Amino acid sequence: MGERAKHPVRTTEKSLRLIEVLNQFGEARLTTLADELEMGKSAVHNHLSTLEKHGYVVKDPDSKTYQLSLKFLDIGGQIRGEKDVYKVAEPKVEELAEASGELVHLVVEEDGKGVYLCRSKGERAVELDTYVGCRHHMHSTAFGKAILSHLPRERVDEIIDQHGLPRVTPQTITSRDELFEELERTRERGFAVDDEERLEGLRCIAAPIRFNSDVIGAISVSGPTTRIDDDWESNEFVDQLCRAVNVIELNKYNV
């Protein structure tokens, strides 16, 4: 969990808030941004001009709107590419998607949430609200519970304190005690499940990726309840998933 800055730089905070608002809006005019940020137009223009000068914001000369540039994609791509777990797991994510026909994700934990590093769609895969770089709560997802199940209890408590246990569907776990019971079951069987806990009609199975006893990520397979049944012990996707993770963990030693 990131530590709160003792002496935050207000100018930097304002620029970061501007970036977040632009990301939310997609594109916006100066007046809209000033209203949203409750800042003067001159001050917002100065922030935009600085970001534009350094290539982080682009301005449409016709519509007079601003938007974030693809420089963020460049930076994100470099960060992702430097992660060993991505280098090793990405080919297996594609193989598993092809073999299962479903949607497969590679996810890591950062600041208490699950961050999607890559995704691959099999021929029958459903389209979900996921994309590379997006973040989701851990307690309502299979990949999240797979990772949480191998973190120290005090770290899990910190994550709960930081992000809570918000209800997403009627099946979402919202009790701390119930979550820890589910994490114990996850450790015992070696994989985690999301039985319509984040999206109704969707089931997910996930297995943790471990290296030197530390959990470094998780792989998940997602599909509609009509194709992924809840007989977990005989579920065909469990074997496919666990075999893929086993290969990833073995290959990790050679990176």
Image (cartoon, rainbow, N blue to C red):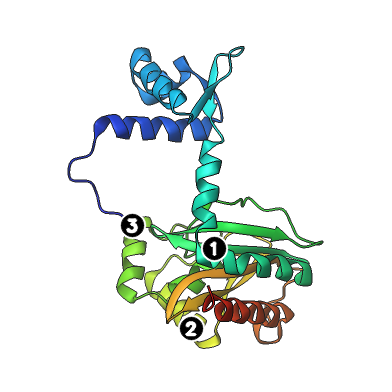
Which amino acid, mark 3? Answer: Gln
Task: List x then y, in percent, for residue 127.
Answer: 72, 53
Q: Which residue is drawn at 31% across and 64% down?
A: 158
Instruction: Please determine whether, in this image, residue 62 is positioned above or below residue 100.
Output: above
Which amino acid, mark 1? Answer: Val
Q: Mark 3: which secondary structure?
A: helix
Residue, far left: 6
> Distance between the Cα atoms at labels 3 and 1?
19 Å
Q: Nearer the viewer, mark 3 or mark 1?
A: 1
Which amino acid, mark 2? Answer: Arg
Task: List x then y, in percent, for residue 231.
Answer: 68, 82
Which of the two residues, 199 or 223, is positioned nearer the viewer here?
A: 223
Q: Mark 1 points at which residue?
A: 107
Q: Residue at x 42, y 22 (%)?
A: 48
> Distance between the Cα atoms at labels 2 and 1?
18 Å
Q: Mark 3 points at which residue?
A: 162
Left or right, residue 34 beside residue 232:
left
Q: Which of marks 2 and 1 is in front?
A: 1
> Distance between the Cα atoms at labels 2 and 3?
23 Å
Quadrant in which residue 237 is drawn: bottom right
Dot 3 or dot 1, earlier in sequence: 1
Instruction: Please determine whether, in this image, residue 156 is positioned above or below residue 191.
Output: above
Q: Is residue 140 visible?
A: no
Q: Mark 2 points at which residue?
A: 187
Q: In which quarter of the image is the N terminus?
A: bottom left
Density class for disc 3 (Cα within 10 Å; few <14, some 14-19, many ≥20) is few
Q: Is residue 169 visible?
A: yes
Task: List x then y, in percent, for residue 214.
Answer: 42, 77
